[in-house]
Image (spheres, rainbow, N blue to C red):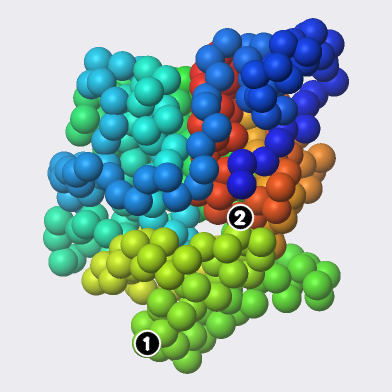
Amino acid sequence: MTGEFNLPRRRFMRVAALAVAAAQFGMGRAALAESARGTSIPATAPGTNTSFAEIKQVNAGVLNIGYAEAGRRDAPVVILLHGWPYDIHTYVDVAPLLAKAGYRVIVPYLRGYGTTRFLSADTPRNGQQAAIAADIVALMDALGLDKAVVAGCDWGARTANIIAALWPERCKAMVSVSGYLIGSREANRMPLPPKAELAWWYQFYFATERGRAGYEQHRNDFARLIWQLASPKWEFDDATFARSAAALENPDHVDITIHNYRWRISLADGEREFDELEDRLASLPVITVPTITLEGDANGAPHPDPAAYAKKFSGKYEHRLITGGIGHNLPQEAPQAFAQAVVDADRL
């Protein structure tokens, strides 16, 4: 189901003024809240759409990137970024909503997913955070996009954060599930309390060769388990899972996944060309672009408390809690709420 917004206090009075009229038309509280700002994204049941019309390919940097596209080519651009172990179907309901709202929507497969491929067999299968963000900037260059609203969850949220922090001139606004996710390998050297360490069990599993072999052999079962743990109230069906699981059959997927998690805890090196970017990210830079952060009320994956990252956003900023049993894969579980956040962030 599409959840409700917990509204910031400063918007309460203007929303309340619409309450009586909205009730007459059966508007949900979320739609009511956003109609006060302007464009109201219509309520959409998750699973309304099951596929994208076409997957396009473009050479960008070290990759040939596969991506879905919706909306007019001359419209303002939104780039939607998926995470692990998900794929572009995270946005299969969000993209048409944004296209109808007047946007050109680009939904790329990250390196190691779907139809995205490395152009050279000699390129390191590198999953470090700066490399993934550089891929998306290269995609923007390849498509001739000067600026875009960038939005994501999981790895995609981290990537959106990095683009906003390092290339703010390319980022008109940002939407990020679970807030500020830029990582520091130095900070990751510090041990966490046992309960927090337990939540990262798969990172420790991937640190071993047994874990690599296990993920290679059982990646679909592994991904399904992560989906269930991260979104314990999301009753996705087999067909929904299968559509995304197909993207994990990419020949580089296991290498990228294992490197990503090993790099985070300094068990694998990155590429030297990203050292300067990683040095800047290690300082945990403040993000200046207009931002809306989102959190589901049933997110079972490790995630920071919103109070811990609120000060990392120095521009116009809002945080929204999406209720109704919404888990980690928020755009797919609550597409209307996510699409609304994109529209509103663009207008902050």
In screen coordinates, is 39 left or right of 212? right
**115 and 330: which is toward the camera:** 330
Q: Quadrant of residue 96?
A: top left
In this rendered view, identify the residue nearer to me: 185 or 76.
Answer: 76
Q: Quadrant of the C terminus?
A: top right
In this picture, is 127 found above or below 169? below
The residue carrying pointer 1 sits among few (fewer than 14), some (14 to 19) or many (20 or more) residues within 10 Å by Cα, namely few
Q: Position of residue 23 (x, y in %)?
A: 73, 20
- Residue at 72%, 33% (x, y): give it: 5
Residue 80 screen position, x and y as percent: 42, 39
Q: Is residue 117 left or right of residue 318?
A: left
Counting from the top left corner in percent of width and height, residue 201 is at 64, 77
Secondary element type, mark 1: helix
Question: Tags 1 and 2 in contact by the CB under 8 Å rule?
Answer: no
Q: Give the CA separation, mark 1 to mark 2.
A: 25 Å
Residue occupying image coordinates x 22% and y 42%: 53
Can you say whether 225 is above or below 7 in the image? below
Above or below, comparing residue 93 to residue 240 in the picture: above
Q: Which residue is mark 2?
A: 328
Which residue in the protein does label 1 denote?
Answer: 217
